[in-house]
Image (cartoon, rainbow, N blue to C red):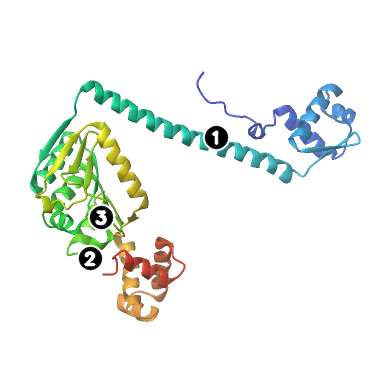
Amino acid sequence: MRNEPHIASDPFETLGLDPAQTALYSAVLRLHRATRKELAQAMDGSVEAVGRQLDDLVRLGVVDEQSGHYQPRHPAAALGRLIARRLDRLAEESRRIDSALGSIRNLIRDYDAGRDYRSGPFTVEMASGADVLYESVLGIAVQAPPMRLVTAVPDERTLIDFVRKFADPWIDAQERGLLSVHVIVPVSTLPLPGVRDQLTRMAETGGRVRTLDRLPSWFMAAGDEVAGLPAHWGGNLPDHAYNFYLVRTPVVVGMLRTLFEELWSRAVPIMHGRRGEGMLQVLRLAAQGMSDESIARQLGVSVRTVRGRFADAMTEFGAQSRFHAGVEAARRGWLT
């Protein structure tokens, strides 16, 4: 078809060698040292045509010319240089594509701003109460499932309210395919009663949870059309009777999603599942001063398994030692 990409039948075409040049290069390899006339005879071609192709091979750096004789460079070195050049060009092309993608995001923002300008003032609804907040999310999800919700919870009181009363309906909505939650919480909240268990359930039912040392404020983006903002940026929702704004415009949703993605890129995934719990078990017991053998007896596993879990923990935390892994786990509140 007309729009199908060209696929090189000769693998060396990708490196800048056309089939005729590849055939001539093979002839130079076989003769190892030859004149233009000898190569023209081997190729059953004219001296002029073979000469032009030899000049191209010399320019590409795969053949050397000395006193009228042509000698090939070792294929590994010669073609390696061509591969390196090709990879450099591909890397530069990739950088240009990344730049183009960044420009597309700017154009999307301009498009959203223009659409909002034409459609008039966007809708801002003031709402109050924790029940209203969490039930609003489920109501939006029911209208357009599966809805991706991104949210940042910066404080202990909001998170405690969530895990005690509102986590179960959200987890149930995830299990039914209505909702997909991505949430960032402060690492200091993990030791709070019930927090780790509910966040683990959230992750095991399809959500994603990450932690940061601190977050700027509560906010959420529900799907592509609805954003949630606190009445007072940076404050605790319970301190202000859960007063918040529901804003229905792609511009605001896009801004909050951009903020969330920036925070998400700096946040750390919460450990969950059997593998994560196994790593935390050995780190907790090691923090109590227990040896590998004692940990193995305590957990009813082999010493080899214990050491494997330590290795997994070091990889997970990017640590150079067990001690460093334990420090990182403690800093994130995972050993409590």
Question: Of marks 2 and 3, which one's residue comes earlier in the chain?
Answer: 3
Please name whichever residue, 224 or 302, is drawn nearer the observer in this view of the structure.
Answer: 224
Question: Of marks 1 and 2, which one's residue comes earlier in the chain?
Answer: 1
> Could you tell whether 250 is left or right of 237 in the image?
right
The alpha-carbon separation of the residues under discs 1 and 3 comes to: 38 Å
Q: Residue at x 51, y 34 (%)?
A: 96
Residue under label 1: 93
- Position in image of residue 145 (x %, y %): 20, 37
Give, as a three-letter code, the residue at label 1. Answer: Glu
What secondary structure is found at the residue carrying circle 2? loop
Q: Residue at x 41, y 64 (%)?
A: 312
Please name whichever residue, 228 or 305, is drawn nearer the observer in this view of the structure.
Answer: 228
Please name whichever residue, 286 or 22, is drawn nearer the observer in this view of the structure.
Answer: 286
Q: Residues within 10 Å of mark 1 (few under 14, many from 20)?
A: few
Q: Residue at x 29, y 27 (%)?
A: 113
> Could you tell whether 50 is left or right of 266 in the image?
right
Question: Of marks 1 and 3, which one's residue comes earlier in the chain?
Answer: 1
Q: Residues within 10 Å of mark 2 (few under 14, many from 20)?
A: some
Give, as a three-letter code, the residue at label 3. Answer: Val
Tell me, yes or no, if residue 183 can be seen here: yes
Give me the disc on residue 30: none
Give me the disc on residue 191: 2
- Position in image of residue 85 (x %, y %): 65, 39
Of the 4 image quadrants, the one containing the C terminus is bottom left
Residue under label 3: 185
> Could you tell whether 3 is left or right of 240 in the image?
right
